[in-house]
């Protein structure tokens, strides 16, 4: 399976095509023969596992426990919360039967009409309804609260236009669902989990994010507040990378989850939910990668260091093997994931291109002359810089280099992002510029009408009211009405 | 939520009821409002996570990589392999539509008839078909082989009679699917994974298992050979705890997966698949637990050591807290999972019963007198033995005790199992005894007729031809015909 680099479309030619090709060529994922459903290949899944492990640890540090709730949700559950059903009914996969039978021609199977379900079941698009139906039995008193559950699972939303990782009918995610005795505690939890997501995005994925709160229009169906982290891709478009919802008592009321509070009165439980999905893989790929392929942050790279020998004969290879063995063992002792690729069926040039394509952060090459000189060639994937270094202290050097790469790609992404955030007070100016990408900080009058007009005329949407912007009142650039604050507007994935 | 021990049915009264109650009372799982689908509660899921982590590491040591394939399978894929569809068609959940719409009364949702799928999709009961349809594109040459993929996921089989963990419509599992260039390599892999399962069952779950190969009747639908591990529950019934299948070229042919072999000829790829599921939780519970509740093997216990203070006043508690702090830190430094439960809202007696119910392997209790004497009371859950020991060296003592408990419950289960394996050569004798449980080693003539007769007349089935039994030819106890070997027969879950 030769993967020729020249086949990878350059970002400058088509950023969109570059992404689509890269996901497949780097062996991350591919379309399956099931409409809109992807296959996550081992290399892509290895990155997802690293994401899962790191996030899971962070959730647990805040007291969250994992659990598992049913894949299928009775249709009637969806209708209990009015906005929720409105938001999800149009994209639900529906199970109507529970049996197949042999067809009359005896050469295939058909749905057995006798096995029709009394009530149709929906494949979960998200699990608030089935989980709150369960919590009903778990919560009687404030002493039973808080409940802090998370599940890692698959969900399904029947999207008409799909793209690998960014928008697929089935995707993998985690969904946290918490129940609280007070409004304050629930709001605090929703914000806490947003912070967990933001920290993870910045420190592990090296993806800088803007934290903020969604407008009413863009809220999760059933939420009172939706908090979001928004990342900027290299084409200047926004990618919503994680959301955390304060659900108020909406689901408590819909599923009649009442408890005796400290004042000995019956009260509906307060809720949050929060999730990130395999969409994060899209953010990771699009933030850092280049025309040579993936650039992975060392903290999430399945292979952090690859070592390739260059040799003319078996004897040379044997000597290099021995030398490299020591380096490999020392790197592993530091917890660094290393691959020594001395396979004989591929040329070094092919290996170099392949590991570049796969985004391995550091490459070491050792040839016969290196062996003589006690040196090794070190290449860092983020800058593609090469240098020849002595093997003395190489292990510590590589360890530090991994940290440096992690930091460097974060700063590079942050600089790019910061250079493409603009304050803008003129709608004509905005309309001319927004199509080229970037985040625009604009005064907004707070009305859904203005929001709809912007979307209609520019395909850009209000991503959030950012938290960390010093806000001053002003004038809405579209309506000319008074505006209390600026919002972040951008085209998005 | 008071959980009164006296409410737990004794095993001697009804083993079946004892199990059903224990799963719920120990907070492992509960029925959901979706027929046959369970909710795995945080404490149960924490055990499952430990199972997953340990198995996943072992799979990876053998070169297996994780991946993810679609939940939904086109109906026509199932029909490609004749035995496979025969085995699974009768228990498939079928997706027929992809959208709901508001009903005419505007108070609920109905299936939108306009959103009918052209071809129905099946929720995976197992993934051979969708995976081999994918492998078709991954395999061209013997150089692309082997492929060693595993996925952790949910599957669905529409069972009519369900029991928590043992038989549920939806369950969690891992399914490994490998593709090989030769028959020998595939057979070797199928056997290798059975050994991984057996080692895990015995060393982590402390559950002794009989390894063997299934009769043709009991094989996986589409397999040439099914290898199995069979465990004995405390009622003497067998529980099939993991299976590994040599699939020959059945799926290679069904999905036209051909490759150029070393002799430059086109050949169909050879396959294996292998899986264990949340059923293991059932095996774990039923093998070790007693009338006081769960008994968990230390290697899979979410909490390995619980420490409970007994105090008359705040001052005493503060002193105990300080003393216990040091012990907790030392235990944690050894990688031992400890909970110090000094919560004031429950009496010590309640805590004792609760942690016994939950199967925490070691309990330490420290009272005011202990504090004075520098002692602590140690209770081990497996034998319920208590002793008072000096705090000097208590950490090492507890560490060793955990190992001892792990070993002890394994030996206890193994002794029980071995005492209930019988050679039997007389069918009347067999019929009289098999209803009381136990594994029977009996000569079998190898015919499906005899096998069916035994099942019909005794509800017992051939569990496997065991590997580790010295076989001598004999006479089938039912038919009187010559028999080449003995098989293991038992009633089963």
Image: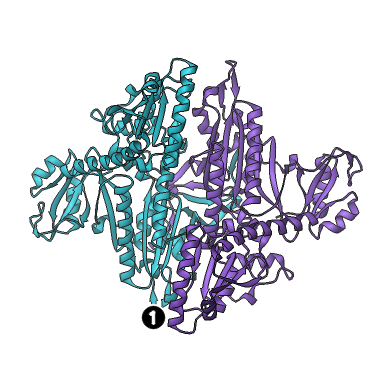
Chain colours: A purple, B cyan
**Image-quadrant location for residue A106:** bottom left
Residue A346 seen in this snapshot? yes
Query: Crowding near pointer 1: few (<14 within 10 Å), some, many (20+)?
Result: few
The residue that appears at 52% across and 47% down in the rendered structure is A153
Instruction: Report x, y in % for residue B26.
Output: 39, 31
Q: Which residue is mark 1?
A: B262
User: Which one is in front, B250 or B245?
Assistant: B245
The residue that appears at 59% across and 50% down in the rendered structure is A277
**SS at mark 1 in the image:** loop
Instruction: Report x, y in % for residue B213.
Output: 24, 58
Q: Quadrant of the C terminus of chain A?
A: bottom right
**Image-quadrant location for residue B435:** top left
In the rendered view, would you say B21 is above or below A155? above
Instruction: Report x, y in % for residue B61.
Output: 40, 59
User: Which one is in front, A371 or A170?
Assistant: A371
**Image-quadrant location for residue A185:** top right
Host chain of mark 1? B
User: Which one is in front, B388 or B416?
Assistant: B388
Q: How many marks?
A: 1
A464 relative position to B323: left or right: right
A50 relative position to B294: left or right: right
In the rendered view, would you say A469 is above or below B452? above
The residue that appears at 47% across and 76% down in the rendered structure is A320
Residue B167 seen in this snapshot? no
Instruction: Report x, y in % for residue A20.
Output: 64, 65
């Amino acid at each position: 399976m030769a993967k020729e680099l020249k086949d990878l479309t350059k970002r400058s030619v088509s950023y969109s095509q570059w992404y689509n090709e890269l996901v497949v060529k780097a062996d991350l994922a591919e379309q399956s023969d099931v409409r809109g459903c992807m296959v996550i290949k081992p290399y892509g899944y290895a990155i997802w596992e690293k994401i899962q492990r790191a996030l899971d640890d962070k959730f647990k540090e805040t007291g969250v426990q994992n659990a598992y709730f049913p894949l299928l949700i009775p249709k009637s559950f969806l209708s209990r919360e009015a906005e929720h059903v409105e938001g999800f009914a149009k994209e639900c996969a529906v199970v109507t039967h529970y049996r197949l039978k042999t067809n009359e021609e005896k050469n295939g199977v058909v749905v057995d009409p006798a096995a029709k379900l009394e009530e149709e079941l929906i494949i979960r698009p998200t699990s608030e309804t089935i989980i709150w139906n369960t919590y009903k039995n778990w919560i009687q008193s404030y002493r039973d609260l808080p409940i802090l559950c998370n599940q890692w699972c698959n969900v399904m939303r029947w999207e008409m236009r799909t793209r690998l990782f960014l928008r697929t009918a089935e995707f993998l995610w985690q969904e946290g669902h918490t129940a609280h005795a007070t409004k304050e505690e629930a709001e605090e939890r929703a914000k806490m989990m947003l912070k967990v997501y933001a920290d993870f995005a910045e420190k592990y994925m090296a993806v800088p994010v803007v934290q903020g709160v969604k407008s009413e229009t863009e809220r999760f169906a059933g939420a009172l507040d939706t908090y979001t982290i928004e990342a900027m891709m290299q084409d200047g478009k926004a990618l919503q990378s994680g959301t955390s919802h304060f659900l108020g008592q909406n689901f408590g009321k819909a599923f009649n989850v009442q408890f005796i509070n400290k004042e000995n009165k019956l009260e509906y439980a307060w809720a949050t939910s929060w999730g990130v999905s395999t969409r994060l893989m899209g953010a990771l790929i699009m933030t850092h990668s280049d025309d040579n392929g993936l650039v992975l942050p060392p903290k999430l790279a399945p292979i952090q260091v690859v070592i390739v020998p260059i040799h003319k004969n078996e004897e040379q290879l044997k000597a290099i093997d021995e030398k490299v063995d020591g380096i490999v063992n020392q790197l592993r002792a530091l917890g660094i994931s290393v691959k020594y690729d001395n396979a004989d069926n591929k040329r070094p040039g092919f290996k170099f291109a392949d590991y570049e394509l796969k985004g391995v952060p550091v490459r070491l090459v050792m040839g016969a002359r290196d062996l003589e000189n006690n040196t090794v060639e070190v290449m860092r994937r983020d800058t593609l810089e090469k240098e020849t270094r002595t093997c003395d202290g190489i292990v510590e050097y590589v360890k530090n280099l991994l940290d440096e790469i992690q930091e460097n790609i974060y700063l590079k992404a942050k600089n790019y992002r910061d250079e493409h955030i603009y304050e803008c007070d003129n709608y004509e100016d905005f309309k001319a510029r927004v199509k080229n990408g970037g985040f625009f900080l604009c005064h907004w009058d707070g009305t859904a009408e203005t929001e709809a007009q912007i979307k209609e005329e520019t395909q850009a949407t209000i991503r959030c009211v950012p938290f960390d912007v010093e806000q001053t009142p002003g004038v809405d650039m579209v309506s000319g009405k008074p505006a209390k604050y600026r919002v972040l507007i951008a085209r998005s994935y």
